Image: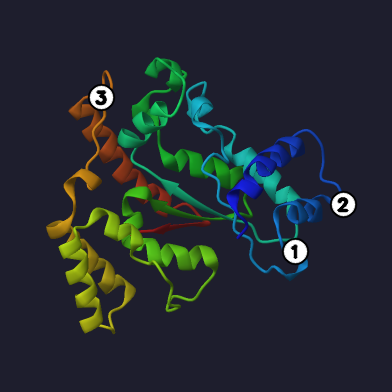
Amino acid sequence: MPRPRHYRQLLSATVKALSKRGVGPDSRMAFLDAIMDIDATEVDRLILNSENFFCVPKIAFNKGRIYPLAGSRLAYLTHLFPDDEVELFLSIRNPATHLPAMYAATPHTQFIEFLDGADPSDILWSDLITNIRQQAPNVRITVWCNEDTPMIWGELVREIAGLSANEPIEGGYDLLAEIMSVEGMTRFKGYLESHPEMTEMQTRRVITAFLDKFAIDDMVEEEFDLDGWTNPLIEQLTEQYEEDLFTINRIPGVELLAP
């Protein structure tokens, strides 16, 4: 896993170049040699992480669509690795919190300008994922909810790294410690030590129970001061988001990780 600063700009530039011209015979090796400190021929699995691979926040919307170039950009990337198995691990987030947070990371001064004609109530992650599947049909997609990340972090790391389900890893509960009180984490770790035979599913149930009692409220609740972002709208977007997960789970070639 090369350091992000070694490849993020090059990755974006390479995909942009591939959209204008075909892939040369040496393009793949040239890209790998540029981002890696070891012999690329010795690598079995390459992990690249880029939160702005689809696009930067300020242009996330175009003519009412969110991340309209996502499918084509991923398709161009598969052209660079025609004989490799390309996978996409995609974290999604409740639009009720994602849109205000993304808007705050842009230079836009008006939310309506940022949306570029999009209606927040029409935004469905299943539409984006379906579009990606259509344009890059050979890419296997794993999706999870950002809200669930602390509860499934260990499994997620194993999935991304290609490790077996029982492979021990360090830091599997690091994110959980950020949203749970010290007392809660101490008790949780003690519970794990006294129940070493628990399955992954049983562990998730235990995490949920501990969070119900020991979650740090300020870390799990988000508030946004945005004109028009009313409680009824937030509730509507949240309900649609939760219902959309069922649609995502039925898309062929897509795996949805959930607690």
Residue pictured at 54% horizontal, 39% vertical: 52
Which residue is the site of mark 2?
25
Outermost residue toward the right in this view: 25
Which residue is the site of mark 3?
225
Mark 1 and mark 2 in contact? Answer it, CB < 8 Å. Answer: no
Tag nearer the camera, 3 or 2: 3
* Quarter of the rendering containing residue 54: top right
Which residue is the site of mark 1?
40
- Packing grade of label 3 (10 A; few <14, some 14-19, many >=20) is few
Q: Is residue 97 above or below residue 32?
A: above
The Cα atoms of the two marked residues, 1 and 2, are separated by 16 Å
Residue 192, position in %: x, y? 24, 77
Look at the image and tell me in which quarter the C terminus lies: bottom left
Which amino acid, by three-letter code, is at mark 1?
Ala
Residue 92, position in %: x, y? 41, 45
Residue pictured at 28% horizontal, 22% vertical: 226
Q: Helix, strand, or loop for circle 3?
A: loop
246 and 173: which one is in front? 173
Q: Helix, strand, or loop for circle 2?
A: loop
Q: Is residue 106 above or below residue 140?
A: above
Look at the image and tell me in which quarter the N terminus lies: bottom right
Q: Helix, strand, or loop for circle 1?
A: helix
Could you tell which of marks 1 and 2 lies nearer the N-terminus? Answer: 2
Is residue 142 visible to us here? Answer: yes
70 and 162: which one is in front? 162
Mark 1 and mark 3 in contact? Answer it, CB < 8 Å. Answer: no
